[in-house]
Amino acid sequence: MRTGSRMKPDHIAIIMDGNGRWAKSRGLPRAAGHRAGVEALRATVRAAGELGVGWLTVYAFSSENWSRPKSEVSDLMGLLKLFIRRDLAELHNSGVRVRVIGRREGLDPEIEGLLHEAEALTALNRKSNLVIAFNYGGRDEIARASRRIAEDVAAGKLSAENIGEERFAEYLDTAGIPDPDLVIRTSGEQRMSNFLPWQAAYSELVFVPCFWPDFGRAELMNAVEVFSSRERRFGGVAARDAS
Ligand code: IPE
Ligand code: IPE
Ligand code: MG
């Protein structure tokens, strides 16, 4: 088991929070905050690439975000489309592989098409990985995985005694993706909001006070620095204390 730290995180996952409050503090509509949030996302993806981070996961829209006013939901959908249309080519040229996690059924066909295009175009890229959590909720992901497991057991493709942690994880949307080492949440809120409950079981959590639109390279480097000063134990004891 890998204990101790002083290491660079290979997988950083980010809860991009605070767009609305950023806008409010400037007397702007929430939509302006979401637009500024997309700029912060661009800057962060670039910075993560420069820092050599292998995996970056971003929480873009949660299963619970459908409860927001219709107009805001539609602004957020519009921005996702815009982001993929504008940035996909650059991501592809930079060798980034894009994957999307979250529930796909019931999405607007245009969005579904764009998500599929992003994954298909970049499928063979190996330089780094961007995982977009869209229409994602951890409980929904676990329930969907359980359902598929039950179907496979019923169909005789899987036997119940073979279901352990590793096999279970293969049914999650994140199959094949390493667990995040570091989870960052901006805006000062200190909660997970249904983000990667299975995968972040042993992640280091760093809560950053700034609103998401104000996040960028410097803030990312700071969070990585905090991560490096942490001691990860994974239930064991620190190497120096083992006797
Ligand atoms: C994060 O900012 C964006 C999404 C959740 C999609 P918020 O919209 O949650 O901003 P606050 O938390 O209201 O400030
Ligand atoms: C979490 O932020 C979801 C995303 C960043 C996409 P929320 O703003 O939706 O979370 P709560 O409602 O404050 O917990
Ligand atoms: Mg929020």
Image (cartoon, rainbow, N blue to C red):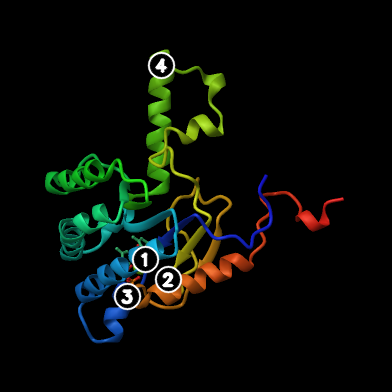
Residue 154, numbered circle: 4
In the image, taking residue 208 as reference, residue 75 lies left or right, namely left
Residue at the bottom extreme of this rendering: 26
The residue type indicated by label 2 comes to Thr
The residue type indicated by label 1 comes to Met
- Whether residue 191 is situated above or below residue 167 in the rendered picture: below
Residue 16, numbered circle: 1
Q: How many marks?
A: 4
Task: Give the SS element for disc 1.
Answer: loop
Q: Is mark 2 within 8 Å of ligand 1?
A: no
Q: Residues within 10 Å of mark 1 (few under 14, many from 20)?
A: many
Q: Residues within 10 Å of mark 4 (few under 14, many from 20)?
A: few
Q: Is mark 4 within 8 Å of ligand 2?
A: no
Q: Name the residue tied to disc 2.
A: 186
Q: Earlier in the sequence, mark 1 or mark 3?
A: 1
Q: Residues within 10 Å of mark 3 (few under 14, many from 20)?
A: many
The residue type indicated by label 4 comes to Ala
Q: Earlier in the sequence, mark 2 or mark 1?
A: 1
Q: Position of residue 151 (x, y in %)?
A: 38, 22
In the image, taking residue 191 as reference, residue 24 lies left or right, namely left
Task: Give the SS element for disc 4.
Answer: helix
The quadrant of the picture showing ligand 1 is bottom left
Q: Position of residue 161 (x, y in %)?
A: 57, 20
Q: Name the residue tied to disc 3.
A: 213
Residue 123, by quadrant, is top left
Contact, mark 2 vs mark 1 (Cβ under 8 Å): yes
Q: Is mark 1 within 8 Å of ligand 2?
A: yes
Distance of mark 3 from mark 2, alpha carbons? 9 Å
